[in-house]
Image (spheres, rainbow, N blue to C red):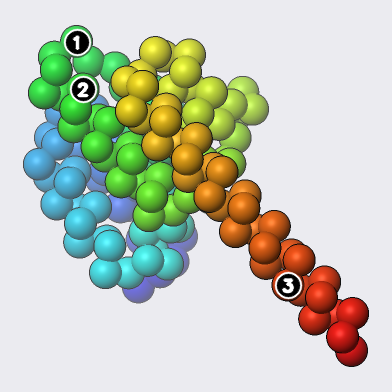
Amino acid sequence: MRNKYNIRAIRKELDDYARNNAWTRFRSKLDTLQSNPELLQAIILAKSKLTSGSLLHAIVKLRSTVDSIAAIIMDLAISMATSVPMALHVQDSQLQTPLHIAVHRQQHPKMIQAFLELIVATDHQNRQTTNTNILTMMDK
């Protein structure tokens, strides 16, 4: 079921898991959502008044001095960005993308590198699609 109330409820559930450091539950819920890419995308892109941005914004804003928690945050952020690359282009209420926040919060260089690689790959893919569409239109 994909409606705005279901999306909000799942987003709130994930926000609560993050706030309470329930990372196993967060990962489990995210893994379950992988079977429904449309719903996963809607949840990751859904903006929250609490975090003023997408779920990816919320995760990237988290910073931990505990290495194991920092690694979990990095893994979750990269996983979400890989599943929904367009989330890297979404701006929060302060017009910042998750990449801006990752750099500002001095997140792990692997996270920043993964974000950059995904942005380049999706931009390249979008250009190829645009070029193909233009060539198709010219053939008509």
Q: Quadrant of the C terminus?
A: bottom right
The relative height of residue 57 versus residue 45 in the rendered view (above or below) is above
Q: Quadrant of residue 3?
A: bottom left
Residues tagged 1 and 2 counted as in contact (Cβ below 8 A)? yes
Q: Position of residue 139 (x, y in %)?
A: 87, 86
Q: Earlier in the sequence, mark 1 or mark 3?
A: 1
User: Quick one: label 3 or label 2, which is nearer the N terminus?
Assistant: 2
Q: Position of residue 52 (x, y in %)?
A: 51, 30
**Disc 1 target residue:** 65
Query: In the image, residue 49 lies at what x, y percent?
Result: 48, 33
User: Which type of secondary structure does the marked residue at label 3 adopt?
Assistant: helix
In the picture, the disc for residue 132 is 3
Q: Secondary structure at mark 1?
A: loop
Q: Is residue 96 left or right of residue 61?
A: right
Name the one closer to the observer, 85 or 17: 85
The residue furthest bottom is 140
How dense is the environment of label 3, judged by Cα within 10 Å: few (below 14), some, or many (20 and up)?
Answer: few
Using the image, determine if residue 81 lies above or below residue 98.
below
Q: Nearer the viewer, residue 118 or 8?
A: 118
Residue 5 position in % (x across, y down): 41, 59
Q: Secondary structure at mark 2?
A: helix
Quadrant including the N terminus: bottom left
Q: Amino acid at mark 1?
A: Thr
Among the 4 quarters of the image, the one containing residue 130: bottom right
Q: Which comes before the other along the chain, label 1 or label 2?
A: 1
Q: Nearer the viewer, mark 3 or mark 2?
A: 3
